[in-house]
Amino acid sequence: MTQFKDLGLGTLVLKGLSDLGFEKPSEIQAEAIPFIVENKQDLIALAQTGTGKTAAFSLPILEMIDADKKDLQAMVICTTRELCLQISQDIRDFSKYIKGINVVSVYWGERVDLQLRNLKKGANIVVGTPGRLHDFINRNKIKTDKLEYLVLDEADEMLDMGFKDDLDAILENASKNRQTLLFSATFSASVRKIAKEYMKEAKEIKIGKENAGAVNVKHEYYIVEAFNRYEALERIIDSLSDVYGIIFCRTKIETQEVADKLKQSGYDAEAIHGDINQNTRTKIMASFKKRVIKLLVATDVASRGIDVSDLTHVINYNLPTQEEAYTHRSGRTGRANNSGTSISICGIRDLGRIKRLEKMIGQDFLYKKVPSLAGIIDSKIDTYINKIETEAPGTLESNYCDKVIERMKKIKKEDLIKFLIQEKFGRIINSNSVEQDLNADLKKTKKHLSGPNVQALRLSIGKKQRADIKTIFALINSNKDTKGMDVGRVIVKQNYSMISVSNKDADKILDSLDNESWRGQRLMIERSNEALSASRSAGRHSRRRRRSSSRRR
Ligand code: ADP
Ligand code: MG
């Protein structure tokens, strides 16, 4: 088995990896790393989302560049601010033990002077979005004449996102001695175009079936009120004829709650998240692989190591906060030539996000209605009767059955049927679910879409950092640009807070407060897709429901 140390990486990089718990290279890493270390030829590397492409280009670059030189030697071009932050953080983690590496990320939405100050310190690696990079290159703040490595990450997205002109300009002027490395999940027409225009004779590495996930995965969504979310989950699961999958939740607490309730209702479910120790996690994973556990309830982080290739479903109990994560999640089904379905349980405010996801993955999502209880039971019984009709009398040895038939003659046929139904479907029929329509009123959804333009913002301070509603208002009112601004709901969580402001004010807050220091730490503010205006009455409602249903259980 290939190890990281066989790939031409030095001890400092290896030490960083071992701190991160990276034990063995992924396929794309095993192929791309030695190639980049040993060759100057351009490279096109194709592998599905979530296969570790960031490390596949970052590690060899860290190995090859001269950390003692302050010239810009490597530039990573990526499509979004989130990716910029993610990739630069990854590179910082990988280079923890290499002195002299300075990674700077540049993107719109953060104050220019801060980014310039960071660049001035002598960045040897820069990670940026095309527009901002272009701008800085034009103003001679970034010099690309000494560039040795130029990475195009998620190249399949770049042209579609309208970055053609920026790319033209950046690549036109970059050092001709550079090695261009293109990473992508698909070999789409636009990737071919980029390769043709900007790359020399490139080596191609392709892992797995290109974009296999996207083709084989169907995407479906349901829209429910927040307080019906769990109930809807049970119904949706019940409506599936066969399910072996992962249910994604946003937090550890939610993950545990959902798994506990599912277990109580008799489903073969278990939770895995960061608070579950390795030992237990290993056991749960083993049962999941053996299909003793059919439903794994997981956080995004905990699910990363899972490699099971024949999942029938991925269920998003909530849409992930970051759209990027949706591809990671849905890519867990539909692998290795199997088909799969990615189901999302959405709130009434999520329709806009569904539209964005459709655009992102280039596929339509199918709106489905949460079936009624009676509907589920009817169709299950129907399927059962059909099965009896087509498969009866079965293949058991007849002289054995004869004895049983003789013994059961006394039992009335009606009673026998009732008993069978009870045995087979009792859990669903007797479940404490109340027959009610769990689908949200779509009129509300539309109203919300065209309603007042509210933007949720996520702040990097929460209870742990001793922030509360008062300190957050104080923060906004202490800045001259945001003073007196209308703020809607404020929710202070453990490690972060959410505030809602009108769309027109969002940029102002981002410009004035993001990256400011707050009580000695750097404050980060970003736009969030989380629907935080879920009404208070919904919260009360769900508590009441929960209490009454636990009594019935
Ligand atoms: P991609 O760019 O291919 O979509 P990423 O580079 O974002 O994938 O990696 C996905 C996740 O897998 C990240 O959380 C990363 O830290 C993790 N990861 C990558 N390589 C390894 C490895 N060799 N061992 C363990 N985890 C890894
Ligand atoms: Mg990536």
Image (spheres, grey):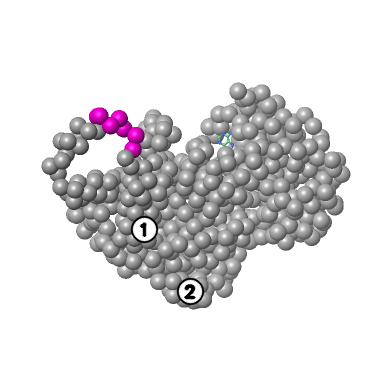
Q: Which image quarter holds the N terminus?
A: top right
* Rendered location of residue 341, percent (x, y): 50, 51
* Residue at image point 23% right, 53% down: 430
Kindly state the secondary structure of the residue where label 1 is placed.
Answer: helix
Q: Which circle marks residue 446 in the picture?
A: 2
* Residue at image point 18% right, 51% down: 414
Who comes first in sequence, dot 2 or dot 1?
A: 1
What residue type is disc 2 on? Lys
Residue lying at the far right in this picture: please name it: 176
Residue lying at the far left in this picture: please name it: 410
Image vertical order of residue 193 relative to residue 401, above or below: below
Viewer-closest of 509 and 331: 331
For label 1, the residue is: 232
Magenta range is 394-400
From the image, state whether disc 2 or disc 1 is nearer to you.
1
* Residue at image point 66% right, 30% down: 30
Kindly state the secondary structure of the residue where label 2 is placed.
Answer: helix
Q: Which circle marks residue 302 in the picture?
A: none
Residue 65 falls left or right of residue 111: right
* Rendered location of residue 526, percent (x, y): 55, 59
Sort mark 2 into few (<14), some (14-19) or many (20+) by Cα contacts within 10 Å.
some
Does any portion of residue 463 appear in the rendered image?
Answer: no
What residue type is disc 1 on? Ala
